[in-house]
C-alpha cells in the first residue's frame, strides 16, 4: 500500500492506458453518435460541413491540450485546473474557473444520462420490440433508466479508482468496436443503397429530402460558427484527465503526452465517423426527419443500422449505449476530485478533502452523485441543448484562465515552472494565445446562440449565476481558512497541495 493510502490520501494507480481510457470514454459517446446528426436540426443549413466543423474543433482542442501538458507535468495534483490556475496565476480565478468546469461537467453528465436511454430504445426497435422501445424513449423510461445509470456509476466509484480505471478500459473497447462498424458500413454504402434499404423498410427517403429542401435549400458556411459552439461539446470531456493527476502513475511523463495523444485519437475518430455517416445518409434526409418531428429517432446507430444485418445493428446500438454509459465514470471522477482539492485547501469543508483507507473520497462521490441526479431532472424538464449551452460557456471560461496561467506561470511560480516537461517552450506561448482567443470567440458564440431564449435558458445568465454562487463559496472559504488555520488562503497557493510526485 502506498504512503498516500496509509494516510487516507489518493492512490497513484492509473497508468497511461487507464487515464487515456478516461479521456476517450468521456468524449467518444453521445457527442458523436447523437449530436453529430442532431446538429442538422439544431443548426439548419450546416449540412455537409459537419466533418469540417469536427476538424476545426480538433485543432482548437489540440492547442488547449498543449497548455494542459505544460501545466499538468509541472503540477500533477488532484484538482487539475484549480491547482494549476491558483498556483500559476490567481487563487480566486483558479476557483472560479474550476467551479465553472464543475458546472460544465455536472450538466454534461446530466445531458449524457438523458441521451443514453434513447439508444436502448433504438435497440428494442431494431429487434421488433417497438412497445418496449417507445417506453424507453418516454419520459418515465428515460427517468428510470437514467437514475439507474447514475447510481450504478456511484457504486463503481465507491469501490476504488482502480476499479473505475479497469471498467473504463473495458467500456472503451466496447465503444470502439461499435464505432468501427458504423464507420465501416458508412463508407461501404452510398445514398442510392440507403434509399433502397429504407424503401424495403417502408420509408420514402425522397419525401424527407423534399421536406428539407423546402425549408433549407443548401448548406451554408455561415452556419459553421453556431455549429462549432454546439459540436465543441463533444470535445470538452478530454480535459477531465486533469482531475486524475493525483492518481496517475509517473505523472510528469504521463501527463506530458496523454493530452495531445487523446486529442489526436478523438479528432481522427470524429472526422472519420461524421464523414462515413454523411457518405451514405444524405444530410437532407436527416434534416427532413428532424423537421417532421422525428428527432428522438435520429442518431448514428439508428441511421446506419438499416445498412447492417439486424443482429449486428443491435450489437452496434448496444455498444453505443455503453459508449454513453462510459461517459459517467470519468465525469464523476473529475467532479469528486475537484471537491477533494477544494476540501484540501479549505474552501469547502475539510471532510471533502479526505478519503477512506482505500483512497476513495466517499463523501465527495455521494454529494456529487446527488447533484448530477438533480441536474438530470432539470435536463428532462428543459432539454439537452440548453444544458449544452451552459456547459460549453463554462468550459470556455476555464480554458481562457488555463491559457492565461500558461503565460504567467514562469513569472508567478518559477520554481514550479522548472518542473514542467515543456519548460520555457515557445510552442506553449503560441498555444496559450490561440487557446485564449479561440475560447473567447466560442464563449461569445455561446452567448449569441441562445440570446433570444427565455432569460433563464440563456447560457450567459446561467453562467453568471454559477459565478455568483462561486464567489460566495470562495468568500466563506477564505474566512474559514483564516479562522480555523490562522493563515491566508493565498499562502496556500504559494505551494502545491501535499501529494506524491
Image (cartoon, grey):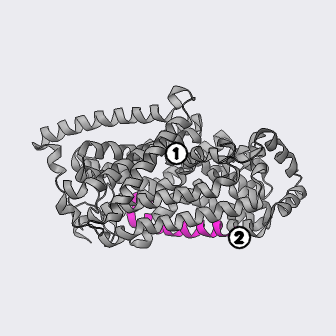
Q: In the image, residue 38 lies at what x, y percent?
A: 66, 48
Quarter of the figure with the N terminus = bottom left
Horizontal relation, residue 454 to residue 360: left or right: right
Q: Earlier in the sequence, mark 1 or mark 2?
A: 1
Whether the magenta-drawn stretch holds residue 125 is answered as: no
* Circles 1, 2 touching at the beta carbon (< 8 Å): no
Q: Kindly identify the residue that appears in the image at 47 percent across and 62 percent down.
A: 23
Q: Magenta residues, as a range?
A: 156-181
Judging depth in this view, the residue of 195 and 362 nearest the camera is 195
Q: In the image, residue 132 lies at what x, y percent?
A: 74, 49
Q: Quadrant of residue 50?
A: bottom right
Horizontal relation, residue 30 to residue 470: left or right: right
Judging depth in this view, the residue of 228 and 42 nearest the camera is 228
Q: Quadrant of residue 259?
A: bottom left
- Find disc 2 in the rendering and name its residue: 184
How packed mark 2 is, by other alpha carbons closer than 10 Å (few <14, some 14-19, many 20 or more), is some
- Find disc 1 in the rendering and name its residue: 110
Horizontal relation, residue 75 to residue 278: left or right: left
Q: In the image, residue 37 lies at what x, y percent?
A: 67, 52
Amino acid at each position: 500500500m502506498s504512503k498516500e493510502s496509509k494516510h487516507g490520501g489518493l492512490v497513484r494507480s492509473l497508468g497511461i492506458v487507464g487515464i487515456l481510457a478516461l479521456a476517450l470514454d468521456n468524449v467518444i459517446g453521445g457527442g458523436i453518435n447523437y449530436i453529430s446528426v442532431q446538429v442538422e436540426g439544431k443548426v439548419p443549413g450546416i449540412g455537409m460541413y459537419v466533418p469540417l466543423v469536427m476538424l476545426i474543433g480538433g485543432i482548437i482542442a489540440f492547442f488547449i491540450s498543449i497548455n494542459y501538458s505544460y501545466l499538468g507535468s509541472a503540477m500533477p495534483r488532484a484538482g487539475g485546473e484549480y491547482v494549476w490556475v491558483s498556483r500559476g496565476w490567481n487563487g480566486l480565478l483558479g476557483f472560479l474557473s474550476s467551479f465553472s468546469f464543475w458546472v460544465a461537467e455536472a450538466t454534461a453528465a446530466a445531458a449524457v444520462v438523458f441521451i443514453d436511454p434513447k439508444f436502448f430504445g433504438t435497440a428494442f426497435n431494431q429487434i421488433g420490440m417497438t412497445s418496449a422501445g417507445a417506453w424507453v424513449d418516454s419520459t418515465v423510461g428515460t427517468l428510470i433508466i437514467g437514475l439507474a445509470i447514475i447510481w450504478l456509476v456511484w457504486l463503481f466509484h465507491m469501490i476504488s479508482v482502480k476499479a473505475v480505471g479497469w471498467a473504463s478500459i473495458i467500456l472503451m473497447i466496447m465503444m470502439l468496436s461499435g464505432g468501427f462498424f458504423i464507420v465501416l458500413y458508412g463508407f461501404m454504402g452510398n445514398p442510392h443503397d440507403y434509399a433502397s434499404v429504407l424503401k424495403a423498410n417502408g420509408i420514402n427517403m425522397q419525401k424527407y429530402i423534399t421536406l428539407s429542401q423546402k425549408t433549407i435549400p443548401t448548406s451554408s458556411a455561415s452556419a459553421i460558427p453556431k455549429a462549432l459552439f454546439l459540436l465543441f461539446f463533444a470535445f470538452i470531456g478530454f480535459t477531465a484527465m486533469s482531475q486524475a493527476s493525483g492518481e496517475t502513475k509517473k505523472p510528469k511523463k504521463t501527463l506530458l503526452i496523454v493530452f495531445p495523444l487523446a486529442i489526436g485519437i478523438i479528432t481522427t475518430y470524429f472526422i472519420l465517423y461524421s464523414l462515413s455517416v454523411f457518405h451514405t445518409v444524405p444530410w437532407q434526409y436527416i434534416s427532413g426527419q428532424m423537421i417532421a418531428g422525428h428527432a428522438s429517432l435520429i442518431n448514428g446507430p439508428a441511421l446506419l443500422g438499416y445498412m447492417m444485418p439486424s443482429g449486428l445493428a443491435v450489437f452496434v446500438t448496444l455498444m453505443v449505449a455503453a459508449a454513453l454509459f462510459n461517459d459517467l465514470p470519468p465525469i464523476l471522477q473529475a467532479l469528486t476530485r475537484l471537491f477533494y482539492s477544494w476540501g484540501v485547501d479549505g474552501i469547502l469543508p475539510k471532510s471533502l478533502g479526505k478519503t477512506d483507507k482505500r483512497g476513495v473520497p466517499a463523501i465527495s462521490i455521494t454529494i456529487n452523485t446527488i447533484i448530477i441526479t438533480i441536474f438530470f431532472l432539470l435536463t428532462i424538464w428543459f432539454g439537452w441543448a440548453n444544458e449544452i449551452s451552459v456547459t460549453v460557456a463554462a468550459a470556455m471560461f476555464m480554458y481562457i484562465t488555463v491559457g492565461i496561467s500558461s503565460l504567467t506561470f514562469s513569472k508567478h511560480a518559477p520554481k514550479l515552472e522548472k518542473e514542467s516537461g515543456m519548460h520555457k517552450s515557445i510552442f506553449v506561448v503560441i498555444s496559450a494565445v490561440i487557446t485564449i482567443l479561440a475560447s473567447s470567440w466560442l464563449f461569445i458564440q455561446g452567448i449569441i446562440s441562445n440570446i433570444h431564449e427565455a432569460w433563464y435558458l440563456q447560457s450567459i445568465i446561467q453562467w453568471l449565476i454559477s459565478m455568483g454562487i462561486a464567489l460566495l463559496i470562495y468568500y466563506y472559504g477564505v474566512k474559514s481558512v483564516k479562522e480555523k488555520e490562522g493563515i491566508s488562503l493565498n499562502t496556500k497557493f504559494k505551494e502545491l497541495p501535499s501529494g506524491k510526485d
